[in-house]
Amino acid sequence: MVLCFITPAPRYPVFVEVGRKPWLDASLRRLRELEKRADKTAKRRIALEAAEEPTLAPTVKPSRVKAPSGPESVRRPGKDIVADITPRTEWLRKADAAQEGMGFKDEVLTTVVGRQAGWSEPARVVAQSELDRAIDAGWVEMWRGVREVKSANLSAGQIAERVRTGDWEMGRGIYGNGVYATVRRTTAETYRNTELSGRSLFDPTPELWGPAPEYEWLGGFKVRDAGRGGLIRIALDPDAKIADYEDLKREHLAYLASQNYLTMPESAYKRSMTDSSFYGAARGYDGVRVHGPMHNDGSQYPPGVTNTDEPDQYIIFNRSVLIMEQASRRYDT
């Protein structure tokens, strides 16, 4: 008989025989009993140690707050029609001929916007509560201020209604032509010639300014007759295709430096393409976001606020990406 001593065992060595003999049976049974007893002791010890540990409350995942449901988007996406426009494009030649110098309306841009399907259709006009729900759901709140045009015998309210549902006309602006709007009400009030109540150039009273990033005036507004009915509250579709102004400018300059453009004969097309807004609308962008150190919105701010700090302006081409609040007098008091 040969005995082999093996030690893989968790607690006690196990003897394995080659050529089993009866006299070892008792020893083997004893070893098995000791092993079972050790198992029970170990399990009891583990149970006792576990009982001494503090019971931890089960981890409860916080419930996800469901975002309020916003209005359904009715955005009409534009197309890139740059390649379709040539020096011989008849509608562009007519628009260029109809352009009246440096008048308020950009006839050429208005025409190219009109070539994009659905862009010039009336905006969706809703009650205040519905616009609130859109903004709560992630639409961008914006404002546009207009005032009367005596030469055209139009009140501020009539012009505002044109912006909502009338002819969709592209105006002129410093950073490109289009329809301007701002995320800051105080800036929009500036453009309808509203007076900031309690505001003095000699006493800026900084405590009446709201916090960054909008720096809204908190002292109230004194609306002049020329601006009554001229404040438009707007919500911008979060799915809108908006170009950053600096990015669009780089893209536009690269196009103007291309051989295709440089070798083109002088024409209405070549003149129109020098405008970044014309280029952006023809490329299918719904609008442009303007911000940064080189961009000033022309409004009043508390001392120390620089152009870099000023909130965003938008230049809109596609009216289908906008929801507008219905006309009311609640912003005139």
Image (cartoon, helix red, strand yellow):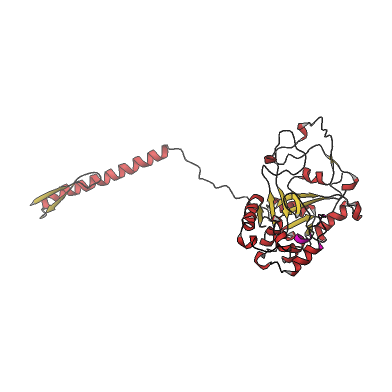
Q: Quadrant of the C terminus?
A: top right
The total of numbered circles placed on residues is: 0
Q: What residue is shown at x 91% (from left), y 53% (from top)?
A: 151
- Residue 84: tell me if it is visible: yes
Which residue is at a point 68% across and 43% down the rendered structure image?
Answer: 294
Rendered position, 99 above or below 8? below
Q: Position of residue 306 (x, y in %)?
A: 70, 37
Q: Which residue occupies 42% across, 37% down?
A: 52
Please indicate whether residue 229 sits to the left or right of residue 51 in the image.
Answer: right
Q: Is residue 158 left or right of residue 216?
A: right
In the image, the segment drawn in magenta is: 98-109
Residue 314 at x, y = what percent? 72, 51
Give the quadrant of residue 253. bottom right
Looking at this view, is 301 or 283 the one in front? 283
Residue 107 falls within the magenta-colored stretch: yes
Considering only vertical position in the picture, is 203 above or below 234?
Answer: above
Look at the magenta stretch and give its main secondary structure.
loop
Which of the two residues, 222 or 159, is positioned nearer the viewer here?
159
Which image quarter: residue 94?
bottom right
